[in-house]
Amino acid sequence: MRLAVISDTHISAPDQRFCALYEAHLAPADVLLHCGDMVGASLYNFLSQHPRFFCVRGNCDHFVLDHDIPVTLSRDIEHPGGALKLGMAHGWGERSSVWRRVAETFPGHGLVCFGHTHRRLWEQFQGAWLLNPGSVAEGSMALVDIAPDGALSCTFLDI
């Protein structure tokens, strides 16, 4: 199973570059995660075409929808080997310690995804894998593969 994880797109609507990214890497993924800072309802609506799209609100997401985008999100992601407990947030506060604040928000989770810093991160902390895919606006995203035994692996893509 594959999760495509993006953050900090900082575009209000999908442009040609983003549509190509969607077709190549986001649409084929089993689950699509956006960790905040979409900045526009048009981009949100475009990403919502994915059948398993989850997102959180970032500090630049001031657009209005007919519903709220959560600031944090916790979901069980079912996969052939069981379920992965996923936590998501954009992040807040001092950038050097965003990872710790986000991780501490989701105790007992197997994967915690966040953005805000625009810096890639893939490391374990207190039993959880922490992932910051970097910023799409700056040419970065991540793919997370879940093996049949539930093991996680991450590949960063330069886009």
Image (cartoon, helix red, strand yellow):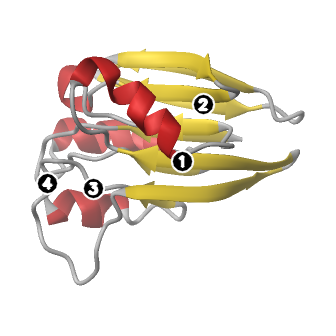
Location of residue 23 by image quarter: top left
Residue at (52% x, 18% y) in the render: 122
Q: Which mark is residue 11?
A: none
The residue that mark 3 highlights is 57
Mark 2 touches mark 1? (CB < 8 Å):
no
In 3D space, how far apart are the residues under numbered discs 2 and 4 (Cα atoms)?
25 Å
Q: Earlier in the sequence, mark 2 or mark 1?
A: 1
**Residue 85 percent coordinates (x, y):** 68, 49
Residue highlighted by disc 2: 144
Left or right of residue 71, residue 51 in this image: right
Q: Residue at x 54, y 47 (%)?
A: 87
The residue that appears at 61% across and 37% down in the rendered structure is 111
Name the kind of residue labelled 2 in the image. Val
Pair 2/1: label in front? 1
Q: Is residue 63 left or right of residue 97?
A: left
Q: Secondary structure at mark 2?
A: strand
- Say whether residue 67 is visible: yes
Label 4 residue SS: loop
Local packing at callout 2 (Cα closer than 10 Å; few below 14, some 14-19, many 20+) is: many
Classed neighbour count for the residue bearing mark 3: other residues with Cα under 10 Å, few (<14), some (14–19), many (≥20): many
Residue tagged 1: 87
Question: Total number of numbered labels?
Answer: 4
Q: Is residue 86 above or below residue 110?
A: below
Tag 4 or tag 1, which sits nearer the N-term?
Answer: 4
Between 12 and 99, the one nearer to me in the picture? 99
Look at the image and tell me in which quarter the N terminus lies.
top right
Of labels 2 and 4, earlier in sequence is 4
Identify the residue position indicated by label 4 in the image. Answer: 13
Q: Is residue 14 above or below residue 123?
A: below
Amino acid beneath label 4: Ala
